[in-house]
Image (tube, rainbow, N blue to C red):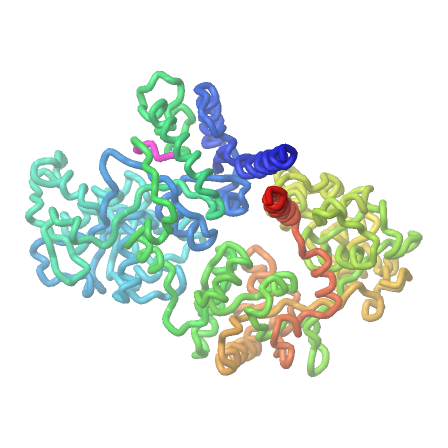
Amino acid sequence: MNAMMMCIFLCLLMTVSLTTAATTQMRWCTISNEESQKCVAMRTAFSSNSLSPEVVCVAGSDIPDCMQKVQDEQANLITLDGGDIHLAGKEFDLVPVIQEVYAQDTYYGIAVVKATSTDLRLSNLEGKNSCHTGVRRTAGWNIPVGFLLEQGYMTPTDCGDDITAVSQFFNQSCAPGAYSERNDPYGQNPQNLCGICTDPRCPPDSTELYQSYAGAFRCLAEGDGDVAFIKPATVIENTDGNGQDTWNRDLSSADFRILCPDGTQSTVDQAENCNLAKSPAHAIVTSPRTTDAQIQAFQDVLRQAVDLFGDDNNQNGFKMFDSTDFNGHDLLFKDSAQNLANLESGLTYRTYLGTYADTIDGLKMCPEGSLRWCTTSAVETQKCRDMSAAFKGEGWSPQISCYEEMSKGHCVDRVIAGDADVVTLDGGDLFEAGNDVAPIVGESYSSGGENPDASYFAVAVARKGTQFGMDELQDRKSCHTGIGKTSGWNVPVGHLIDNGHISVDDNCDIPKAVGEFFSAGSCAPGAKTDKYDPEGTNPNSLCSLCIGTGNNFCVRNANEPYYDYAGAFRCLAEQAGDVAFVKHTTVPDNTDGQGTEDWSRNLNSSHYELLCADNTRAPISEWLTCNLAKVPSHAVVTSNDKTTAQKQEIRDLLLEGQNLFGSDTGTGFKMFDSEAYGDTDLLFKDSTQMLVNVGQQDTTLEWLSEEYVKSLEAIECKTGGAIKTAQSSMVVVMIAFLIQMVWFGMLSRK
């Protein structure tokens, strides 16, 4: 019995150690060098005062990257404003657990008019002149514009294109920052956005007299605007003797009214009951998988920290709510914060944000009945809008609108959820999406024949004269288009695993196995990035052949010269690698006079050979019989919930569209050419010759080839996933063993 009790104690100890290990650290994600410096100072201050859990600073490239790190549990916490809390909750499932507390509570976004404008209501502001604190500012833009869109008073022109919607709704506006590069990257924003500003450039700084809160109110007071979108304190600070400038010295609060959502007007002292939305305090968010015990530990240590470091005049060597020592502002926390307050367990982002969440939803609204195309970058969104304009100019329907997301994965989520309608996916993304989506049309990279094949072939290429085949690649140097990419990684790695050449350990650590197999070195762009190497354990050898400089070394984009098809072949042509994994057109596209870059200009296709799956070799031209897999081309997909008629409507629009805009020549819009946007493969691959009907291959599994599915199935487990499973399994085994021992003990007492 004593032995059994000892076993129980040890099992419980091991279980508790697994549960509490994560609470010994509080990993905070930072987004700048200045914030990282303040985080390190906070870590030192906590440690010096024996505060636990210890602070660990995790560097993120930007706020969405930090959200991803918190979701992936590489970090625990980050402080966000209301708009980012909405994004973190909707896209990353993060939850608020602690909020900041300020001397003055969070404010309301209000619409103010002159008391003489007795006929003005929120429902009839169209055609009036508007005064805003600045584009994308909370009270002056996000709240009122989102409210007007969400309520249907303002009509969206495109998904998330609130700037154009405002320009078409109001007659003239002063919206400082409307022409800044951030808000107008292509210099196309309408002139009426700054039509009543004091500076026609309407910069978002003090040179524009109508910028910020006081400026927007001045715009109304001086009669240039009919309505000003501000916060209640603005009226108080500039009326009834509180204003000391010429323009506000004689203003009376009684001369102004607030427009209420119920269609009435109210005096300015009734903002609590007459407002568009309440601006939420910044909040600290975490992963929904963070345990209650962890959250309690984080809340406790931050409460202790506020007692020690919350006062900006404290003598303890660190100021939580002051960033001046780090040459920044609002680092880790807002500088105006005075305290932190714990939030109730299980609080969702929508509940926390309240009516503010509705205004953010309004900002993302799409035109009713439009075909919402999901894009993943600002430049792709611009091409999407140009395609929409081109199609609209022909009178085609439905109208295309452009719904921007951060990644293909998020686009798939939006399509499945019904927030977007279509997105173009490669084979790997389509495999991940599964049968929740359905292919509509596929890209064809050849134009010959009446029914061009919407597929291509993944091939392995070596220099002629070398003496090895596909079964003899171990310890050689490899060139990949990018980690996780179809022809350059998924197919060849899957093939080598499936045929027993690459052995994977129990943790299913694919990058480690590939690195050990190609022991002489590789260039697999992206192999050491956070997304593909979250724990930093991928072998450095996976990037050892890459030639990108500085921060562009081994990145998964064109800044790494050995990235993608041409880059992987260049890696081989420049004799950095022994084998390149590309698609069947890569060598012809870059040899025999077809190459336009210096590295490819004099290359001859006869100097290269294909490595066949049966360990033989063949000329480059024999890719049809010597390849690793027939790979499905990229496909435009939609939700599988759509009706046959809805799918056909989308298909007809795209097939009709390519008849006019499918050529790469001419001066008009080009569906399959992204050169005008300074990028590649936007909306469609630039190598696309035409779109084809998927026919009977209208499901994910029917669209993907059998060989490709086998390759993906061989590598579908990810680094770290099996480890977590193993840890969970170990806990389960220990609990089962514990129950078994207790059962045996009970039996022994009978």
* Residue in the picture at 81% in, 70% down: 624
145 vs 93, left or right, is: left
Residue 631 vs 133, above or below: the answer is: below
251 vs 531, left or right, is: left
176 vs 711, left or right, is: left
* Residue in the picture at 10% in, 63% down: 119
* Residue in the picture at 86% in, 62% down: 612
Residue 209 location, x and y as percent?
Answer: 24, 42
> Is residue 562 visible in the rendered structure shown here?
no
46 vs 313, left or right, is: right
Quarter of the image where the N terminus is located: top right
Quarter of the image where the C terminus is located: top right
Residue 102 location, x and y as percent?
Answer: 27, 35
Report the number of numbered marks.
Answer: 0
Front-most of residues 680 and 73: 73
Residue 424 vs 51, above or below: the answer is: below
Front-most of residues 297 and 516: 297
* Residue 152 belongs to magenta span: no
Residue 39 location, x and y as percent?
Answer: 46, 29
| Bounds of the magenta segment | 333-337
The residue sitting at the front extreme is: 750
> Is residue 343 visible in the rendered structure shown here?
yes
